[in-house]
Amino acid sequence: MALYAIGDLHLSFGTDKPMDVFGGVWNNYVEKLREGLKVITPEDTTILLGDLTWALDLSGAKEDFSFINDIPGRKIILKGNHDYWWSTAKKFYSFCQEHDFSDMLILNNNAYTYEDIALCGTRGWFFEEDAAVGSHNDKIFKRELIRLETSLKQAQGREIYCFLHYPPRYRGYECPEILQLLKAYGVSLCCYGHLHGDSHKLAIEGDYDGVTFRLCAADYLRFQPLRIK
Ligand SMILES: [Fe+2]
Ligand SMILES: [Fe+2]
């Protein structure tokens, strides 16, 4: 039994947006993912940290989720900035039922457990999205903070691993409101994705103020899921 994390699969079976066009590490990325994901067994849990598919809606995401469904074991999914298919949990679960996809769970305003660890998280926030007070983005930002805290509250005294799509800190940037929540709830590990290509240089990994940070974007991990427990 193991716990894995990987984000940014950026699948595009149903759309014309393959990542191979970015070249380099993204060449044949689906094959690399297939290989990398082979370590996962039916007893394992895998957290998928957003940017899963380029599809614009669930019907267009069928093949991408079929690929994800083929990953053995429990899959816990959170939202990235490119997950346009995301609407409501209810719609997602009926989509799964309709296509016989199982063991795919949404992490949004809730939490799961793995052994004695609480698995919490949300999409998070990024400086690209200006959160000027009173703006539309400010409202989304505050909603994300509420979602994160709602999730963290469900840890109920357990050790907490927190999963975010956006990095709450990297070189030259910090999101103090999110970092404060991680600290206040005693999060021990924070995994994030979103950073690609040259942005990998900006990633901060390791211990900071009591929290261990890990970048889990698929290209950074060379398409091998990161074993975190
Ligand atoms: Fe991404
Ligand atoms: Fe992203």
Image (cartoon, helix red, strand yellow):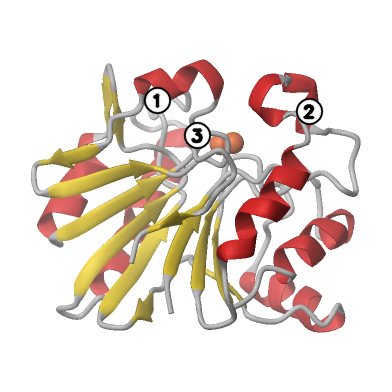
How many neighbours does mark 2 have within 10 angstroms: few (below 14), some (14-19), or many (20 or more)?
A: few
| Tag 1 secondary structure | loop
Looking at the image, residue 219 lies above or below residue 183:
above
Could you tell me which residue is drawn at 35 percent across and 69 percent down? 119
Looking at the image, residue 178 lies above or below residue 57:
above
Where residue 163 sits in the image (x, y, percent)?
Answer: 39, 55
Q: In this view, does 6 lie to the left or right of 126?
A: right
Q: Do labels 3 and 1 touch, CB within 8 Å?
A: no
Q: How many labels does the image show?
A: 3
How many neighbours does mark 3 have within 10 angstroms: few (below 14), some (14-19), or many (20 or more)?
A: many
Q: In which quarter of the image is ligand 2?
A: top right
Q: Nearer the viewer, residue 141 or 107?
A: 107
Give the residue at mark 1. 127
Looking at the image, residue 150 lies above or below residue 146:
below
Give the residue at mark 2. 20
Q: Is residue 23 left or right of residue 210?
A: right
Could you tell me which residue is drawn at 11 percent across and 56 percent down? 184
Looking at the image, residue 111 lies above or below residue 177:
below
Mark 2 CB lies closer than 8 A to ligand 1: no
State which quadrant residue 70 falls in: bottom right
Q: Kindly identify the amino acid type of the residue bearing the numbered disc 2.
A: Asp
| Tag 3 secondary structure | loop
Q: Residue 220 carries which label?
A: 3
Where residue 17 sits in the image (x, y, percent)?
Answer: 84, 33
